[in-house]
Image (cartoon, rainbow, N blue to C red):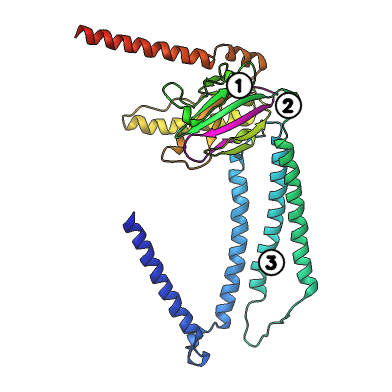
Amino acid sequence: MTVFLIIIVVALFAITLWQLSRIFQLSRSTQSLDDSQIASDKDNRMQGNLMLAFGIAFYIFMLYNFWAFGDRALPAASSEHGVDYDNLLLLTMAVIMFVQVITQGLLHYFAFKYKGKKGNKALFFADNDKLEFVWTIIPVIVLAGLIIYGLFTWSDIMDINEEDDPIVIELYAKQFSWQARYAGQDNVLGKANVRFIEGANTIGVDESDPYAMDDVITAEIHLPVNRPVVFKMRSQDVLHSAYFPHFRAQMNVVPGMVTQFAFTPTVTTEEINETEYMRDKVARINDIRKENSQALLAAGEEPLEEYEQFEYYLLCNKICGVAHYNMQMKVVVETEAEFNEWMATQKEYSETMQSATASRKSAVSGAEVAQVEN
């Protein structure tokens, strides 16, 4: 790493010296310059034509990317607030694309139309108050409108109505995995702190808090459709980011503090797999896997399994270490009845700790017996 940094420093130093030499040459009297360094009409025509050609090629390439890769975008949002989020994103992109097309188009066209020509003199304005006012006030109004719209959208997203009886779930992040803790029957999360991590208590639950005893710790997330969910997030080590792309939700998970995000899922896992978009996506993935499997078989390796169906996932959207890519947790959206049935099979925290204590005592007793026999 040190050698690599030294190489970068030396390269930057060489570039600096080269730029200084260029500045020195340009600062000399124009009389001492060689005529070959002065742009001729031919040079200006070539540069103007290249600018126009580059501008046309840029927009052709942009349109091609929209056409060729448009299906790579996410499907319709699977959360209640996702519609507002997508509308905000669409409006912002429309404004940006409108400005980009006009400004970049004029830039390349003017470079072509007003290319240098011997004997021509550019018309120069020292200042123009009206023009400066127009190009200042228009961006201010547009940006202010986008910001205000964004603030109202964000406020609506983050507004949690306790009367809707939201489910409370804690997301606990650590390198490189997630754990979920449901608030249990009382829907109140027990206290927790990393200082309480010991043995089977892997997320630091405060066992002196009675609210913690009915909490449920799981390795995957199950959510009932059309019911609000409040996620409270903690990190054990470094900065992570809880990212639910299909629900249009993301929130940083910061060590030493609790962050929060809420959304209402509106499309079950079963329903999204019935959409034409997802059926096509699954079929395309399986086609790719078949091609790769043929290559693996030819190399004497095991082929890839067929991709059965789409699943929602919680991802980490911060590069948190070497195994960041593998930090994910399955999310299942189902009916209220299916969710209740799944919850009935989960152990409360008190039961989990009792089982862990019993297992530990059994292991100690077995070790003592083995020691006596020896």
Residue 313 quadrant: top right
Pointer 1 with pointer 2, Cβ within 8 A: no
Any magenta on residue 234?
yes
Neighbours of disc 1 within 10 Å: few (<14), some (14-19), many (20+) = many
Q: Please state which of the two labelled residues, at mark 3 or mark 1, is closer to the viewer.
A: 1
Residue assigned mark 2: 162
Closer to viewer: mark 3 or mark 2? 2
Which contiguous range is marked in magenta?
A: 224-243
Q: State the residue lying farthest toward the front.
A: 208
Q: Closer to the camera, 345 or 126?
A: 345
Q: What residue is shown at x 62% (from left), y 86% (from top)?
A: 118
Q: Earlier in the sequence, mark 1 or mark 2?
A: 2
Q: Residue 183 has which mark?
A: 1
- 155 lies left or right of 183: right
Q: What is the three-letter code of the residue carrying label 1? A: Ala
Q: Quadrant of the N terminus?
A: bottom left
Mark nearer the N terminus (3 vs 1): 3
The label shown at residue 331 is none
The reply, left or right, for residue 261 in relation to residue 316 is right
Which x, y percent locates residue 52?
Answer: 62, 67
Residue drawn at x 27%, y 10% is: 368
Question: Picture coordinates of residue 83 (x, y %)?
Answer: 72, 36
